[in-house]
Amino acid sequence: MQRKFVVKTSKTFLKEIAKLYPDVALDITKALKILEISPFPFGKGLIKKLKGFIPPLYRLRVGDYRVLYRITGDEVVILRVIDRKELERELKKMLG
């Protein structure tokens, strides 16, 4: 039997996803189901562990958007959803 993870969302994520087109928000919501089964990186670059973050920060690719999250025990905490064009700038801000 596969390990099951619980996906939790931050207030910031909920505010950001509410601003997106409904079809894009739906695609992102569907993609979060992947994280319930396995939130760790595996083939094809869909999920990536980002360098330089402690605790580790992960990125899920969904079309032109990137979902940032952390794993704590059996919980996957969704932090942000960011347009791919804005990702580098936002990550630099997060690193300080």
Image (cartoon, helix red, strand yellow):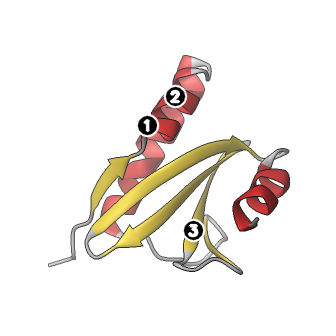
Answer with the quarter of the image where residue 20 lies: top right
Amino acid beneath label 1: Lys
Amino acid beneath label 3: Tyr
Q: What element carries label 2?
A: helix
Q: Mark 3 points at which residue?
A: 58
Answer with the quarter of the image where residue 51 lies: bottom right
Q: Name the residue under label 1.
A: 11
Disc 2 packing (10 Å; few <14; some 14–19; many ≥20): few
Q: Residue 66 location in percent, x, y?
A: 65, 50
Q: Residue 67 location in percent, x, y?
A: 58, 51
Contact (Cβ within 8 Å) of mark 2 with mark 1: yes
Label whose residue precedes the other's in the sequence (3 or 1): 1
Q: Mark 2 points at which residue?
A: 15
Vertical position of residue 51 compared to residue 63: above or below: below
Amino acid beneath label 2: Lys
Q: Is residue 69 left or right of residue 84?
A: left
Which residue reaches farthest front?
96
Nearest to the eye among marks 3 and 1: give it. 1
Question: Looking at the rendering, in which quadrant would you find the C terminus?
Answer: bottom right
